[in-house]
């Protein structure tokens, strides 16, 4: 019998929403440096490569330590990991707000990587535990929107703060936000760690053998692989496809609209997974829809309005994938440890996809133009559909 969830009859919506906001505040660790890229470069007189490293190092931590974080969270306790990670993030933002030497900025970004990883492993595990069965896929779909929402809010409110109070004010504001989440959750969450997952027993298995067991467990691995091909694709589509639109006005409109389409798709996926079909089926549907959009692109290169509609459809279907992948984890996992491992793998493989995707698409576009992009999307959709198919064959 599965021990994944307690007999929760009612969803603890207040805690779920606050945990989601905590996730948004953690994702802003990426957004605040992306938003202030030019200002950072001007203030510290660094090269674009070094400033870019300050942005990407947060994701590199997730790439290296994603699975390890899932293992440790089960041993330490999800509440402790979450509050500690948020507190660490707040301290790092306050240090950044003091505008220290750039080498110290890089150190704080490395530590922010651990902070961000702790949140993305612990928070969704806790959300799943606090959700009633009839709402679990919906709350996972909500969680899946945290990254897009963080960038949307940062692009609006963060830009105004940056213009009025410079980078110091922006980082200070982020420190106040993420620190407030740590304080609020300290007061709000039950101190009983068993409420969010039982302590992981020490079974005497070595670290690397344990890693092997996690990677060989399809219940933890397959959602991460489905997610991998999403991150390979979405960042690249948002970066490269709008440049294929000749109209400057339409291009600007799409650059604002497309991230919102992605966020909407993620939440829709949670609802579909809860009430209409299994999340594995939602992922297959998403990859099929994305592939159809890619095939149509080449037919409407000379019709900007139709081309833009097809792009929006592709991004909407792409947005379904993370909602489906995140909803798979509590459906497939047999206990809270498999859940945490699943979220750790999603963090790790998601960062891998975001790392290898853009250069792969850039190469394909350079060699073959729009047809290179279309071909790569079709290959990715085929691979993502295969892993979603295998996940669908697992017994729940």
Image: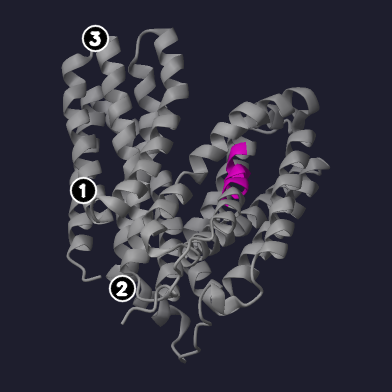
* Residue at the limit of the structure toward the right, as seen here: 98
Residue 28, percent from left and from top: 61, 42
* Residue at the limit of the structure toward the bottom, as seen here: 204
Between 149 and 37, which is closer to the camera in this rendering? 149
Determine whether, in the image, residue 220 is placed left or right of residue 151. Answer: left
Q: Provide the residue span drawn in magenta.
A: 23-31
The quarter of the picture where the C terminus appears is bottom left
Determine the secondary structure under disc 1: helix
Residue 40, percent from left and from top: 70, 32
Instruction: Tell me the mark number nearer the camera, choosing from 2 and 1.
Output: 1
Between 317 and 349, which is closer to the camera in this rendering? 317
Q: Quadrant of residue 318?
A: top left
Residue 190, percent from left and from top: 64, 71
Residue 382, percent from left and from top: 18, 46
Q: Residue beneath label 3, please?
A: 303
Q: Main secondary structure of the magenta part?
A: helix
Q: Residue beneath label 1, please?
A: 284
Nearer the N terminus, badge 2 or badge 1?
A: 2
Between 181 and 118, which is closer to the camera in this rendering? 181
Circle 2 residues within 10 Å: few <14, some 14–19, many ≥20: some
Circle 3 residues within 10 Å: few <14, some 14–19, many ≥20: few
The quarter of the picture where the N terminus appears is bottom left
C-alpha separation, residue under disc 2 versus residue under disc 3: 47 Å
User: Residue sitting at 49 percent across and 69 percent down?
Assistant: 70
Tell me if residue 232 can be seen. Answer: no
Tell me if residue 318 can be seen. Answer: yes
């Amino acid at each position: 019998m599965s021990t994944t969830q307690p007999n929760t009859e009612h969803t603890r919506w207040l805690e779920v929403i606050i945990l989601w906001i905590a996730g948004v505040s953690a994702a802003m660790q990426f957004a605040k440096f992306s938003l202030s890229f030019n200002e950072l470069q001007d203030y510290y007189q660094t090269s674009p490569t070094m400033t870019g490293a300050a942005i990407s190092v947060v994701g590199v931590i997730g790439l290296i330590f994603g699975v390890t974080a899932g293992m440790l969270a089960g041993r330490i306790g999800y509440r402790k990991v979450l509050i500690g990670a948020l507190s660490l993030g707040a301290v790092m933002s306050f240090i950044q707000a003091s505008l220290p030497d750039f080498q110290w900025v890089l150190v704080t970004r490395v530590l922010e990587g651990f902070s961000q990883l702790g949140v993305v492993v612990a928070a969704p595990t806790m959300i799943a535990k606090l959700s009633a069965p009839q709402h679990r896929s919906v709350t996972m779909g909500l969680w899946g929107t945290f990254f897009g929402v963080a960038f949307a809010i940062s692009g609006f409110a963060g830009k105004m703060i940056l213009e009025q109070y410079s980078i110091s004010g922006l980082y200070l504001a982020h420190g106040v936000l993420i620190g407030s989440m740590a304080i609020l959750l300290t007061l709000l969450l039950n101190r009983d760690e068993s409420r969010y997952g039982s302590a992981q027993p020490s079974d005497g298995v070595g670290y690397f053998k344990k890693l092997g067991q996690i990677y060989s467990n399809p219940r933890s691995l397959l959602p991460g692989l489905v997610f991998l091909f999403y991150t390979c694709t979405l960042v690249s589509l948002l970066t490269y496809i709008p440049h294929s639109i000749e109209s400057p006005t339409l291009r600007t409109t799409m650059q604002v609209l497309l991230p919102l389409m992605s966020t909407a798709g993620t939440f829709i996926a949670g609802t579909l997974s809860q009430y209409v079909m299994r999340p594995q089926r939602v992922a297959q549907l998403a990859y099929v829809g994305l592939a159809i959009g890619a095939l149509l692109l080449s037919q409407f290169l000379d019709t900007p309005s139709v081309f833009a509609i097809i792009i929006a459809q592709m991004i909407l279907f792409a947005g379904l994938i993370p909602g489906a992948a995140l909803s798979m984890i509590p459906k497939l996992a047999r206990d809270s440890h498999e859940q945490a491992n699943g979220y750790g793998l999603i963090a790790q493989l998601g960062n891998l996809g975001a790392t290898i995707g853009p250069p792969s698409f850039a190469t394909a576009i350079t060699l073959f133009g729009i047809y290179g992009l279309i071909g790569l999307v079709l290959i990715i959709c085929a691979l993502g559909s295969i892993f979603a198919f295998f996940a669908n064959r697992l017994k729940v």
